[in-house]
Amino acid sequence: SRGAQVHHFPLKSDLVTAAIEDLLRQYSDFLAARLKNLPDGRAGIRIAAETLFDIYSSPLHDAYQELHVAARTDPELRRSEAAMLTAVVWPTLDLFAEALAGPAVHDDRSLRERIAAAVTLIRGLAEVRGDRGKNWRERQITLVVDWLEPVVLKARSQAAGDD
């Protein structure tokens, strides 16, 4: 009811901030569950890329985008969103990078940048997917995997050689 809503969220920004927090927590839980114990090699890279495509093409991401747009014009919401990015999104993307490439990702700027670019590419592809179909999705993921595989496998083999 409206009364219960106002009781729990006296300001509109309180409600939207709580929604952003809940969405980002769901993002984090989804990614953490799917990225845990990835298989080695190309199969793990593919699962990681598919996981990102799935989250970015989900209703969860659509809802986040709506909240993100609202935060663009509201300074209070912008601060809440920035805090959530720092607390949840960036650490989650770090989890993605480490699950994909191992601990070496923390010391290899080029590798981190390539993974960050792949995340951005996958997000963009998921957002323009429209009705292009599953074959289009699979082809795009294959292109991303082809692009990431050499640097990820190199980083993993160097890390294994360091042990």
Image (cartoon, rainbow, N blue to C red):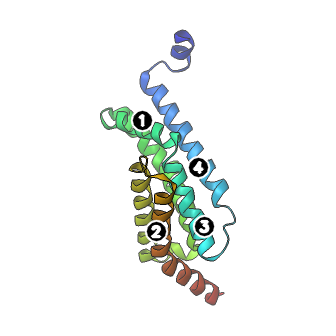
What's the distance in space between the residues labelled 1 and 3, CA to CA? Answer: 28 Å
Task: Determine which quarter of the picture holds residue 72.
Answer: top left
What's the distance in space between the residues labelled 1 and 2, CA to CA? Answer: 28 Å
Mark 1 or mark 4: whose residue is earlier in sequence: 4
The residue shown at (59%, 75%) is 42
Q: Quadrant of the C terminus?
A: bottom right
Question: Is label 1 in a helix, a strand or a loop?
Answer: helix
Mark 4 or mark 3: whose residue is earlier in sequence: 4
The residue where tag 3 is placed is 99
Mark 1 or mark 2: whose residue is earlier in sequence: 1
Name the amino acid, label 3. Ala
Image depth: mark 1 or mark 2 in front? 2
Question: Is label 3 in a helix, a strand or a loop?
Answer: helix
The residue where tag 4 is placed is 28
Mark number displayed over residue 67 = 1
Question: Is label 4 in a helix, a strand or a loop?
Answer: helix
Residue 153 appears in the rendering: yes
Mark number displayed over residue 144 = 2
Classify 156 as above or below 76: below
